[in-house]
Image (cartoon, rainbow, N blue to C red):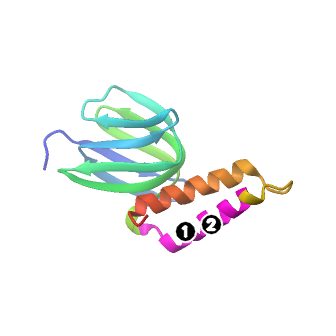
Amino acid sequence: MAEKVLTMEVVTPERHVLTTDTNGIVVPAHEGYLGVLYNHAPLVTILDTGILRYSLDGKVERMAVCGGFMEVDENKIIILADTAELAEEIDVARAMDSKRRAEDRLRQMGEKVDEARAQASLQRAIARIKASGKE
């Protein structure tokens, strides 16, 4: 095991997703992707929809996250996400269907289409597909 590790915990309102050691992570923060390594300064940030990548001893893992917050303090990372799915949990066929439906809604753009909601749905689907590794 590597010497310089952080502990990462990912939790959603529905469940505890993961607790693991990591050499570093990259998260979709509100102002862009943000990396965290050992001895990072204390930090609290808002998360956007995207792919969270974390590694340990050279092995990179991914998960899709949608919204929430991240806190970093004393080599511990706590992620409180609105939703989070590990790559192996993602139903790729369902994510592809969601992506197609969101794209169809955006193409229609009539009075009854909520553009912000359709865009958010599209971004979630894309993040899930990319996190699964089966783009």
Residue that protrudes farthest toward the front in the picture: 107
Q: Residue at x 53, y 43 (%)?
A: 48
- Quadrant of the snapshot with the C terminus: bottom left
Residue type indicated by callout 2: Arg
Q: Which residue is mark 2?
A: 100
Q: Is residue 122 above or below residue 79?
A: below
Left or right: residue 15 versus residue 108 is left
Q: Nearer the viewer, residue 2 or 94?
A: 94
Q: Nearer the viewer, residue 64 or 78?
A: 64
Residue type indicated by callout 1: Met
Contact, CB < 8 Å: mark 1 with mark 2? yes
Describe the element under mark 2 as helix, strand or loop.
Answer: helix
Q: Residue at x 27, y 36 (%)?
A: 37
Q: Nearer the viewer, residue 105 or 5?
A: 105
Describe the element under mark 1 as helix, strand or loop.
Answer: helix
Q: Is residue 34 above or below residue 63?
A: above
Q: Which residue is mark 1?
A: 96
Report x, y in % for residue 111: 86, 54
Residue that protrudes farthest toward the bottom in the picture: 93
| Marks 1 and 2, how far apart at CA | 6 Å
Whether residue 86 is visible to the viewer of this picture, yes or no, is no
Q: Residue at x 33, y 46 (%)?
A: 8
Left or right: residue 101 versus residue 88 is right
Residue that protrudes farthest toward the top in the picture: 41
72 part of magenta stretch: no
Q: How many marks?
A: 2
Whether residue 43 is visible to the viewer of this picture, yes or no, is yes
Report x, y in % for residue 92: 48, 70
Magenta-drawn segment: 89-106
Q: Residue at x 34, y 53 (%)?
A: 19
